[in-house]
Image (cartoon, grey):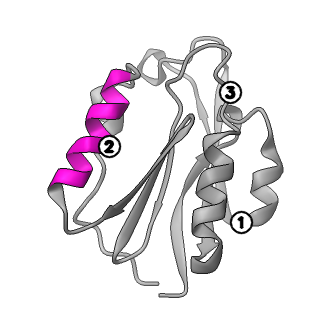
Amino acid sequence: MAHFTGSIIEESLVDTSVLEKVKIVSTRVEAVTDRHKTPWLEKWTIDEVHIPITQAKTVAAELSHSFDVSHSNTWYADFKNKLYHYVIFPGRVFCIDRSNEEQYNSAQQYGASLRIPSYMLDFDKREEEEN
């Protein structure tokens, strides 16, 4: 369990310096559609990242203060390993024990209170990362 894996959308950040603290293993670009709920953007640049266990808490905190909230509070990022799943919203970080359904429910309810579409809050609790 050497690292956490996850995704960060570059356009979600006003300060991208946090990306210097993670290892970007791949990048894909998606054209924005109505489903993305970000009509002010033309694309999402999605970085798949690895984050060292020792840096996870720091990166999560920095992400929570780096989101662009000028249009909405609907951004979030997440990363996980076999035991824990960080779900990061503007100004709030959930460090979820992956075996605890109640902790997932709390994060989903909080995300819904920010008006994040429910399909985006369907965190994959079952997937086991090989870290």
Q: Residues within 10 Å of mark 1 (few under 14, many from 20)?
A: some
Q: Residue at x 56, y 36 (%)?
A: 91
Q: Amino acid at mark 2?
A: Ala
> Residue 54, percent across and down?
62, 79
| Of pointers 2 and 1, the one earlier in the residue sequence | 1
Label 2 to label 3: alpha-carbon separation: 20 Å
How many numbered discs?
3
Q: Residues within 10 Å of mark 3 (few under 14, many from 20)?
A: some
Q: Is residue 28 visible?
A: no
Left or right: 46 with respect to 114? Answer: right
Q: Residue furthest bottom?
A: 1
Which element carries disc 1, helix, strand or loop? loop
Vertical placement of residue 31 versus 16, above or below: above
Q: Residue at x 47, y 18 (%)?
A: 37
Residue extent of the magenta highlight: 102-113
Question: Mark 2 or 3, which is nearer the eye?
Answer: 2
Marks 2,1: beta carbons within 8 A: no
Vertical placement of residue 85 versus 43, above or below: below
Give me the disc on residue 71: none
| Of pointers 2 and 3, the one earlier in the residue sequence | 3
Give me the disc on residue 22: 1
Question: Mark 2 or 1, which is nearer the eye?
Answer: 2
| Of pointers 3 and 1, the one earlier in the residue sequence | 1
> Residue 130, percent across and down?
41, 83
> Residue 87, percent across and down?
44, 50
Residue 40 colored magenta? no
Vertical placement of residue 104 versus 44, above or below: below
Q: Residue furthest left?
A: 101
Give me the disc on residue 68: 3
Q: Amino acid at mark 1?
A: Val
Q: Amino acid at mark 3?
A: Asp
